Amino acid sequence: MPSLISLLSGIIFGLGLSLSQMTNPNKVINFLDITGNWDPSLAFVMLGALSVTFISFKQILKRPKPFLIDDFHVSKRSSIDKALIGGAIIFGIGWGISGYCPGPAVASIGFGSVEAFVMVLSIYAGFLFQKWGHRKLSRVE
């Protein structure tokens, strides 16, 4: 049952990304281009998502446990460190260059987008590189 709920949630999320045009890299790049052909419409999408999250997240976490699994998986970390800042910078550069962030890139693969497929492969390459680098640094210390 959790897998079915996850699948349905993913489909609904992908439809929302498509309807809001977040799967259109040109729309995203125009949103990020505040000094050129700026398109503020994605700000409304983001504000809508943040509003729903802000209101519902606190209510959901008041429950003793989720409906379908035993425990909530929420990070206990609250500090801002070099790794977080570096990751945010890399994420922002990738988003600005490609016009895709991870969710819309995965959804765009369903449309047959080669660019989105390359983006998702790049994301996974970044995951592997981070693991490799973390292991290397752990040995040095």
Image (cartoon, grey):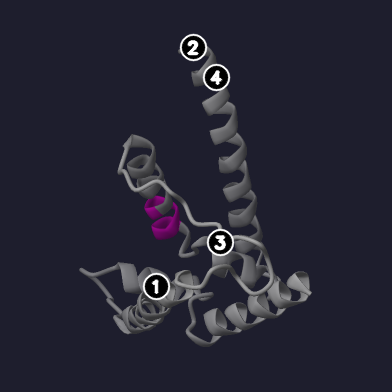
Label 3 vs 2, first from the N-terminus = 3
Give the residue type that dot 2 points to.
Answer: Val
Residue under the point 68% across and 65% down: 69
Q: Nearer the viewer, mark 1 or mark 4?
A: 1
**Which secondary structure class fits the magenta region best?**
helix
Label 3 vs 1, first from the N-terminus = 1
Label 1 vs 4, first from the N-terminus = 1
Left-right relation of 21 to 2:
left
Q: Decide: marks 2, 4 in contact (CB < 8 A)?
A: yes
Q: Which residue has dot 3 on it?
A: 72
Residue in front for this viewpoint, 90 or 53:
53
Give the residue type that dot 1 points to.
Answer: Lys
Residue 84 lies in the magenta stretch: no
Mark 3 and mark 1: Cα distance apart in space: 12 Å
Residue 58 has which mark? 1
Residue under the point 49% across and 62% down: 101
Q: Which residue has dot 2 on it?
A: 140
From this viewpoint, which residue is outermost toward the bottom? Answer: 19
The image shows residue 123 at horizontal and vertical percentages of 57, 49
Q: Which residues are magenta?
A: 92-97
Look at the numbered disc 2 and give the secondary structure of its residue: helix
Mark 2 and mark 1: Cα distance apart in space: 41 Å
